[in-house]
Image: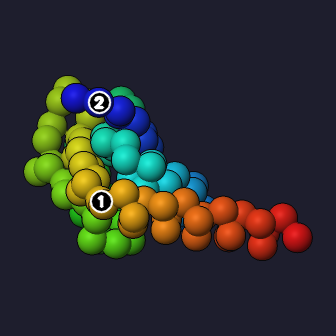
Amino acid sequence: MGKFKEIRFGINIDNRDYLLKLKKTNNFLLEGYNVKVSVFFKGREIIFKEKGIELILKFQNNIKGVFFNFSDIEFEGKCIFSIFIPKKINENKKKKYKIIKKKIFIKKKN
């Protein structure tokens, strides 16, 4: 299966935390990792499955770029998840992404 990362959060996630998870997922997809996004339920929260589905759909819509595919939403115990798979990019495009990423990092440092 290759490189694989998992992002987990609950249904009561704060907006800042959500944006951080979104940013991390974007970075992982750019680096070529498959990312499993999971929403877990604690205790009686399992009653609100709709909230979890809405969160994953929102996550799928907010991911930037058209360089990935995602699986259907699946249920597993007290968890709902979807898997994001990056599309393969040419070597030239990979180099461009790395250069752009380095430039952004250098600008932030200064």
Please state which of residues 19 and 63 is positioned toward the viewer in this rendering: 63
Mark 1 residue element: loop
Name the residue furthest front.
92
- Residue visible at 26% across and 34% down? 79
Q: In the image, which disc is placed on residue 2?
A: 2
13 relative to 76 in the view: left or right: right
Instruction: Report if residue 53 is visible in the image.
Output: no
Quadrant in the picture for the N terminus: top left
**Residue 16, horizontal then vertical, whole percent:** 60, 62
The numbered mark, 1 or 2, whose residue comes first in the sequence reads 2
Which amino acid, by three-letter code, is at mark 1? Ile
Disc 2 marks which amino acid?
Gly
Give the residue number, with chain letter if any, for mark 1. 89
Q: Is residue 93 visible?
A: yes
Residue 45 is left or right of residue 12, and the answer is: left
Numbered disc total: 2
Q: Position of residue 107 (x, y in %)?
A: 78, 73
Quarter where residue 93 is shown? bottom left
Residue 41: x %, y % from top left:
34, 36
In the rendered view, would you say 23 is above or below 79?
Answer: below
Decide: few, some or many residues near mark 1? Use Cα within 10 Å; few <14, some 14-19, many ≥20: few
Position of 90 compared to 101: left or right? Answer: left
Q: Decide: is 78 above or below 47.
A: above
> For the C terminus, which image quadrant?
bottom right
